[in-house]
Image (cartoon, helix red, strand yellow):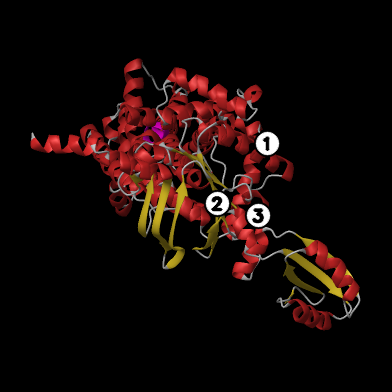
Amino acid sequence: MAWLKGKVAIKQMGYIDKSKDNKSENIIEVKNLVKEFKGLRAVDNISFSVKKNEIFGFLGPNGAGKTTTINMICTLLSKTSGSITLDGYSISKERNKIRNCIGMVFQDPSLDDRLTALENLHFHGLLYNIPRATLKKRSEEVLDMVNLTERKNNLVMTFSGGMRRRLEIARGLLHYPKVLFLDEPTLGLDPQTRNKIWDYIIKLKENREITIFMTSHYMEETEICDRIAVIDRGKIIALDTPENLKNMIGGDIITLTSEDNIKLKKYVEDINGIEVHDVNEEKIRFEVKNSSGFVPRLIKESPVKILSITARKPTLNDVFLELTGREIREENASSKDSMRMRMRRRMRH
Amino acid sequence: MKKELAGIYTVWLRDLKRYLRDRPRVIGSFAQPILFLFVLGTGIASSFSVFGGGGGEEFLDFMFPGIIGMTVLFTSFFSAMSIVWDREFGFLREILVAPISRTSIVVGKLLGGSTIAMIQGSIILMLSPLLGIPIDFLIFFKVLGVMFLMAMVISGMGIMLASVIKSMQAFQVITNFLLMPMFFLSGALFPLNRTVEWMNIVSKANPLSYGIDAMRFTLLGDVSLQLYPMWLDVLVLSFLIVAFSVTGAFLFNRQD
């Protein structure tokens, strides 16, 4: 029985508890993750960790590898190499344990539109083995959270895009997951509905302990994150808080048009010692620390006539531009994307 | 284990609920067999007298089990193949991230497709009094059993294909190049043992021909129309169910 004693001793020394502490700091750990599709590297050797109870965001253009990474973490897609652990469970061995503690809201609708809202929740409860009485209570709770209680017995077919999304969020929360994945939760929704969805998510975060892992290619939406990983062409090119990322820019952004841009450009560069970029043939752009003092001074002292000038705080789009030299915007939709959009439209009618 | 059973039940129940709510599908899948039976069947039957030869009415009787087989074939195949688009655009993703095994999903899908096919087949079976084919409870349950075997084979085949095929276009191709020949060479529309030799040989490799054969014997009880003994039909179908569903589950388990 010596081995048993040893184990107990280890426990008493707090050895096991210590490992638990580590676990509670980072809920997701990804190391050297690679995914190749027929020789193409969709995810190229990325490593990052997500802290418990934070909102973690993936920001990047379409096709950057956001969804591929999420699909690997949520056990939908196998990895080419690397390691993933979630709440201490390894993706290679304990898939069902991981599935139990994650909630998903997919980029594409995954509700059954021929079932009612309540039935969709009921099926979810069956799949996650939630006892009947608990299921009933929780269904009411999550439906109430997303304001769909009155529509609970209607077929999902009759729901608008925003309502479907809300129901999907409710369903993702039904089994009280530790991590909720939101993959482009507002894609294809109008701005008003998008705001509403975020209101629900913020409310959710206030009311319970949950880690949220989200992706978006709408800059302003990722601002609610505690930390953001900027991802481009399968690589993480920056990972920090939104504030720190924006501080990388080094001040406010000035965009202006003048009668002689070349002359003005040289003037600003000489006086202020900052680099000035050409936006297009008419506009130039640069950053300054304090725009409210700078702008009036420039207008007064400029050697050429300034035709228009704007000053604004940097956004995450500027960060992306700074890091990659490109803007995040919807590039030409691939055939799969346009297929998706068609399906989405079809499903809505 | 209890969890897995709950998973199987969920996948099955979902398919069934969807089917029962889809009125156009219920009616539509009823219309095609009737068209085949009463328009095509009657047409062919009446042409017999033109080319010399009798037995026009008997031909409708002959064709009836084939039409039930056709219903089972198409219903269970399309049910299983719904995985293809369900994976990309629908509820299947929700099931795939749930803590149940892929094998349970396959079993649920097999049973779901088969149940729907049996319901559809039974509806067509209700037409038998119109053709003067006598049916009692015993025959009904035997036919139900044959439909179950057939549906499981075809669903298994569908899942096997759906695990390999990922696009809707390929799905169309399969329908034309696999399903239609399977149907034509199954003995559903004409007796295989009286046609040219190659057809007879090809039909032996066709899972459906064993199902149709069993169905015809069960319904009509006519030994002269039998291609294979009943025990062989049941044996081949049972073997194929095991082979197809194990392969299907294996392929479905493979992640991308």
Residue drawn at the location 60% of the way across and 38% of the way down? A201
Same chain for labels 1 and 3? Say yes or no: yes
- Choose mark 1 or mark 2, whichever is in front: 2
Q: Quadrant of residue B155?
A: top left
Q: Quadrant of residue A23?
A: top left
Q: Is residue B124 left or right of residue B107?
A: right
User: Which residues, given as a range, are shown in magenta?
Assistant: B110-114
Q: Which mark is residue A227?
A: 2
Gap between marks 1 and 3 measured at Cα = 24 Å
Task: State whether residue B227 appears in this view.
Answer: no
**Where's residue B170, x and y in %?**
47, 55
Report the amino acid beneath label 1.
Answer: Ser
The kind of secondary structure element at disc 3 is: helix
- Whichever of callouts 2 and 3 sits on the residue coming sooner in the sequence is 3
Q: Which mark is residue A219?
A: 3
- Whichever of callouts 1 and 2 sits on the residue coming sooner in the sequence is 1
Residue drawn at the location 62% of the way across and 45% of the way down? A344
Report the amino acid beneath label 2.
Answer: Arg
Residue B254 shown in magenta: no
| Residue at numbered disc 1 | A160
Residues packed near mark 1 inside 10 Å, few (<14), some (14 to 19) or many (20 plus): few
Q: Quadrant of residue A62?
A: bottom right
Residue drawn at the location 35% of the way across and 25% of the way down? B144
**Where's residue B123, x and y in %?**
47, 25
Residue B112 shown in magenta: yes
Q: Is residue B126 left or right of residue B160?
A: right
